[in-house]
């Protein structure tokens, strides 16, 4: 019997704008993925994350002091 790995479902990086304080740590943890506006609030990529972006996104989610970032399954 062969076991096959299922591909991971596509994910999107999301922010809870009420919870976010605009600290900007996420952009330091994932600089190629997240930028910030003039007030420090994250500007996230639109659409699904590719496998290379997923690792950076997870670091940003774990490092958010307000727990305002999360990965959302499509």
Image (cartoon, rainbow, N blue to C red):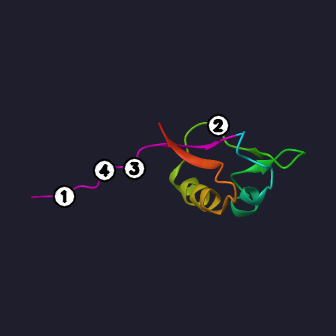
Of residues 19 and 71, the one drawn nearer to the viewer in this rendering? 19
Mark 2–mark 4 Cα distance, whole angstroms, equals 24 Å
Q: Secondary structure at mark 4?
A: loop
Residue 61: x percent and y percent? 61, 56
Q: Secondary structure at mark 3?
A: loop
Identified at 36% across, 49% down, the residue is 7
Identified at 66% across, 48% down, the residue is 68
Are there few (<14), some (14-19), or many (20+) residues within 10 Å of tag 3?
A: few
- Reading the chain from its start, which is encountered first: label 1 or label 2? 1
Tell me the residue that label 1 is attached to: 3
Mark 1–mark 2 Cα distance, whole angstroms, equals 34 Å
User: Does the magenta run of residues contain 56?
Assistant: no
Residue 56: x percent and y percent? 61, 59
Tell me the residue that label 4 is attached to: 6
Residue 62: x percent and y percent? 60, 61
Give the magenta-colored segment's residue range: 1-16
Identified at 55% across, 57% down, the residue is 52
Q: Secondary structure at mark 1?
A: loop
Mark 4–mark 1 Cα distance, whole angstroms, equals 9 Å
Identified at 88% across, 46% down, the residue is 39
Kindly indicate whether the residue at mark 1 contacts the one at mark 4 (C-beta within 8 angstroms).
Answer: no
- Reading the chain from its start, which is encountered first: label 2 or label 3? 3
Tell me the residue that label 3 is attached to: 8
Kindly indicate whether the residue at mark 3 contacts the one at mark 2 (C-beta within 8 angstroms).
Answer: no
Q: Secondary structure at mark 2?
A: loop
Q: Which mark is residue 46?
A: 2
Of residues 14 and 53, the one drawn nearer to the viewer in this rendering? 14
Instruction: Report the magenta stretch's main SS.
Output: loop
């Amino acid at each position: 019997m062969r076991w096959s790995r299922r591909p991971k479902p596509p994910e999107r990086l999301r922010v809870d704008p009420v919870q976010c304080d605009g600290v900007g740590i996420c952009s330091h943890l994932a600089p190629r993925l997240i930028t910030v506006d003039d007030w420090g609030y994250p500007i996230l990529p639109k659409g699904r994350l590719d496998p290379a972006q997923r690792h950076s996104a997870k670091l940003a989610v774990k490092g958010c002091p307000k727990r305002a970032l999360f990965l959302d399954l499509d």
